Amino acid sequence: MKKTIQVSVIIPIFNSEKTLNGCLESVLNQSFKNYEVILVDNNSTDKSKQIISSFQNSNKKIRYFFEKEISRGAARNRGEKQAKGDIILMADADCVVPRSWIENMIFPIVANGYDAIQGFQENFQNNFWSKQTQIRLALKMNSFDSQNTIGMIDTKNFAIKTSVLKRLGFTNRKYISGNDTDLSIRFKKNNLKLVFLKSVKVKHNHPNSFRTIVSKCFYRAYWCAIIAKDNKDYLKNTDFLKRTNQTFFSFMKFFPGLFKTLFTKGLKYTYFDLVTGLTWRVGLIYSKIKNYW
């Protein structure tokens, strides 16, 4: 690994006191040494700032910034524009990364010149909701196609050349959620090279209750519809609307598809699809009513 390469790790933070200690301990214990850690506080009201201060007092790698606009996109954008590294790595405050995370994520970029690397994630918890979420994530990434990467960027475990991200205009501050989807669309528009590295996994706290699943699905669907609207001319020539259930046919086949799933996958799998599928479609409809008409 070239010692001259500098890396910037960016982590947006909002009320993350329950997971932040574990996240920072792992990020600051890396085999690769030439890196900075940019923490962007997005108006936390818990003890996140105190936790950051305690780590900052003992580790000079940490750079702290405050972003007053409450938006994950705004927080990432702020951190990206402050980054000094040649490569930017992204993670969330509820992730724990392996010791060789930076080294393994940047190696394909340095060695092969790839524009960006998408890593994988594994479940940190062990209940029905989190396990079912992990199953769906694995299915999604198993279908990864380097020629069709729209919707495949996940900033929980992502590396990108700083020069490429700057050329793309950084993370869009407009979108409170779905910034990685928007970034993947711009990535594809510019014919950039994204490679999936399944072997590099971070541990993530997946949604672990009915309430958190419903909240996240609704919120993501709401913003997904807005992003689709903003890119409608480009996306109409892709399968993105079909894959995100924004077509009439995808609505019509939902319940017949559940019956098929019940017989092929079982009750638990079907129940999860029922909850998330209905919530997603309600989020899409609400977004279209509010923002389209």
Image (cartoon, rainbow, N blue to C red):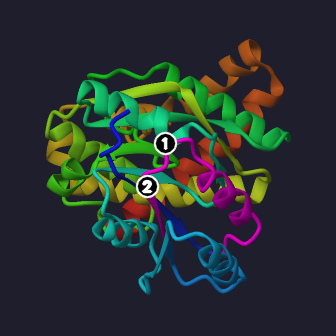
Mark 2 burial class by Cα count in 10 Å: few <14, some 14-19, many 20+: many
Is 90 placed above or below 149 here?
A: below
Question: Residue at the top extreme?
Answer: 264
Residue identified by numbered label 2: 35
Task: Identify which residue, 287 or 38, lies in the foreground.
Answer: 38
The amino acid type found where label 2 is placed reads: Tyr
Mark 1 burial class by Cα count in 10 Å: few <14, some 14-19, many 20+: many
Task: Identify which residue, 125 or 276, lies in the foreground.
Answer: 125
Query: Mark 1 touching mark 2, by CB under 8 A?
Result: yes
Can I make out residue 152 in this image?
no
Q: Position of residue 246 (x, y in %)?
A: 39, 42
| Nearer to us: label 1 or label 2 | 2
Residue at the location (59% across, 69% down)?
59
Q: Is residue 266 magenta?
A: no
Residue at the location (35% across, 42% down)?
3
Residue at the location (66% across, 27% down)?
258
Q: Position of residue 290 (x, y in %)?
A: 39, 70
Task: Identify which residue, 29 or 141, lies in the foreground.
Answer: 29
Task: Identify which residue, 56 or 15, lies in the foreground.
Answer: 56
Left or right for 82, reference 244: left
Question: Residue at the front extreme?
Answer: 3
Q: Secondary structure at mark 2?
A: strand
Residue identified by numbered label 1: 102
Is 144 placed above or below 24 here?
A: above
Question: Residue at the right extreme?
Answer: 127
Q: Position of residue 138 (x, y in %)?
A: 60, 26
Q: Secondary structure at mark 1?
A: helix
> How many angstroms separate mark 1 from mark 2 (CA)?
9 Å
The amino acid type found where label 1 is placed reads: Ile
